[in-house]
Image (cartoon, rainbow, N blue to C red):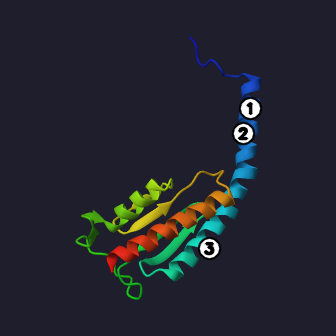
Amino acid sequence: AHGSTFGGNPVIAAAGIASLKIIEKELMKNAAEVGDFLKKGMIEIMNRHRIIGEVRGLGLMIGIELVQDKNTKEHFPSAVTINRENIKEVITGECFKRGLILYGAGFNSLRISPPLMITKDDAAEALKIIEEVITKVEGQLL
């Protein structure tokens, strides 16, 4: 019986080991460094905007909590919408139009979860887009 086309192939095994070394050394280091850059940048954005209540995360997975009241951390009620869309959906949609994919997490949170090989330049562009969109959304909520 045939078990595997590549089973026991030393060239394929060497390629797999080389890939794991890249992941373990380069990509993990990049995830830590760029993740720290993203988180610090998001905290700076949070400090300038009233609808971001908390920024949390580890490595490249960053959570952004959207709040109606920064002091009490009260979330937006489901009735608060812009053009009949939930605030989170408006933000993710506007970011997508600008080339940035954010994920919704629950009703009032966003998640940044970029690929492991993201550069600091790409992360800086993502932060710029997020701030532009948050500024626009806050203006629509007034």
For residue 17, side relative to residue 124 (left or right): right
Q: Could you say which is closer to the camera, residue 104 or residue 1? A: 104
- Helix, strand or loop at label 1? It is helix
> Which amino acid, mark 1?
Ala
The label number, if any, that marks residue 61 in the structure image? none
Q: Residue furthest bottom?
A: 71
The residue located at (33%, 77%) in the rendering is: 141
- Few, some or many C-alpha atoms within 10 Å of disc 3 (few <14, some 14-19, many ≥20)? some
For residue 8, side relative to residue 71 (left or right): right
The x, y position of residue 137, in whole percent, is 39, 71
Q: Which residue is mark 2?
A: 19
> Which amino acid, mark 3?
Lys
Mark 3 vs 2, N-terminal side: 2
The residue located at (22%, 71%) in the rendering is: 79
Looking at the image, is 20 positioned above or below residue 33?
above
The label number, if any, that marks residue 15 in the structure image? 1
Point out the image quarter for the N terminus: top right
Q: Could you say which is closer to the camera, residue 54 or residue 99? A: 99
Asked whether the viewer can see residue 65, the reply is no
Kindly report the distance in space between the C-alpha atoms of the residues bearing marks 3 and 2.
30 Å
> Which amino acid, mark 2?
Ser
Kindly report the distance in space between the C-alpha atoms of the residues bearing marks 2 and 1.
6 Å
The x, y position of residue 132, in whole percent, is 49, 69
The residue located at (76%, 38%) in the rendering is: 18
Kindly report the distance in space between the C-alpha atoms of the residues bearing marks 3 and 1.
36 Å
Tell me whether the residue at label 2 lies in contact with that at label 1, contact meaning CB atoms closer than 8 angstroms: yes
- Helix, strand or loop at label 2? It is helix
- Helix, strand or loop at label 3? It is helix
- Few, some or many C-alpha atoms within 10 Å of disc 1 (few <14, some 14-19, many ≥20)? few
Looking at the image, is 21 positioned above or below residue 114?
above
